[in-house]
Image (cartoon, rainbow, N blue to C red):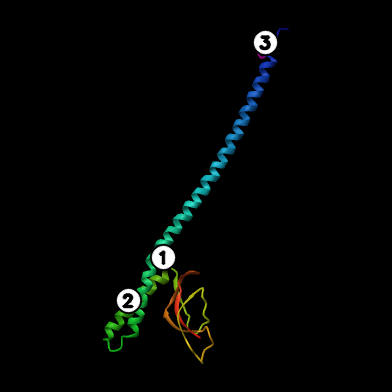
């Protein structure tokens, strides 16, 4: 019988080698694809982190000066004796409104008076001798300290006992 098969054993070997080469090329291409996908995912996450950090920095740059305005309202409210009641109520209303806006953003003050001085959250601007309080006790709060969530936004400026 005569063989009708046009393929010689040599040609079958070449085809098998070519198939193996194509399989290897496909495997390398797939590995490259997976690496590129992982790199892209890491890039996307880094861009999102950078974006979030930039937004937070922008908010902090806006909020810090507002804390000074809040301090000025507190000082004004301490010196309102003799002012017409309508003016006092108006200043108090504006103060509460500003305070409410900051609190809605997660910004809150913390009390320091009569607490032990903590350099992580307090900035000592003076010290006074005291027989009533132990050393390193906060005796006066010059500027209130604020946190944004758990992060310190502004340390409290305080006077401590010697």
Q: Nearer the viewer, mark 1 or mark 3?
A: 1
Q: Which badge, 2 or 1, is on the more N-terminal residue?
A: 1
Please determine whether, in this image, residue 64 is positioned above or below residue 4.
below
Magenta highlight on residue 25? no
- Mark 3 Cα-neighbour bin, 10 Å: few <14, some 14–19, many ≥20: few
Q: Which badge, 1 or 3, is on the more N-terminal residue?
A: 3
Q: Main secondary structure of the magenta part?
A: loop
Q: Which element type, helix, strand or loop, lies under badge 1?
A: helix
- x, y percent for residue 135: 53, 85
Comparing 106 with 123, the one in front is 123
Identify the residue at horizontal 34%, vertical 78% (top origin): 73
Q: Which residue is mark 3?
A: 4
Q: Nearer the viewer, mark 3 or mark 2?
A: 2
- Mark 2 Cα-neighbour bin, 10 Å: few <14, some 14–19, many ≥20: few
Q: Which residue is mark 1?
A: 60
Magenta-drawn segment: 3-7
Farthest residue in the right direction? 1
The Cα atoms of the two marked residues, 3 and 2, are separated by 99 Å
- x, y percent for residue 141: 43, 81
The Cα atoms of the two marked residues, 2 and 1, are separated by 21 Å
- Mark 1 Cα-neighbour bin, 10 Å: few <14, some 14–19, many ≥20: some
Please determine whether, in this image, residue 74 is positioned above or below residue 18.
below
Identify the residue at horizontal 45%, vertical 59% (top origin): 53
Q: Which residue is mark 2?
A: 94
Identify the residue at horizontal 34%, vertical 83% (top origin): 77
Q: Where residue 102 is drawn, which disc sits there?
A: none
- The reply to whether the C-beta atoms of the residues labelled 2 and 1 are less than 8 Å apart is no
């Amino acid at each position: 019988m005569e063989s009708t098969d046009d393929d010689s054993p040599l040609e079958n070997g070449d085809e098998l080698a070519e198939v193996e080469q194509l399989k290897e090329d496909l495997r390398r291409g797939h590995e490259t694809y997976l690496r590129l996908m992982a790199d892209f995912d890491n890039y996307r996450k880094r861009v999102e982190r950078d974006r979030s950090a930039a937004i937070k920095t922008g908010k902090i740059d806006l909020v810090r000066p507002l804390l000074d305005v809040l301090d000025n309202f507190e000082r004004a409210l301490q010196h309102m004796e003799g002012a017409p009641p309508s003016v006092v109520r108006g200043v108090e209303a504006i103060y509460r409104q500003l305070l409410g806006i900051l609190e809605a953003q997660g910004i809150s003050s913390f009390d320091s008076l009569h607490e032990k001085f903590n350099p992580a959250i307090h900035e000592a601007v003076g010290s006074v001798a005291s027989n009533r309080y132990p050393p390193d006790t906060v005796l006066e709060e010059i500027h209130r300290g604020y946190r944004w969530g758990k992060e310190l936004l502004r340390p409290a400026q305080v006077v401590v006992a010697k």
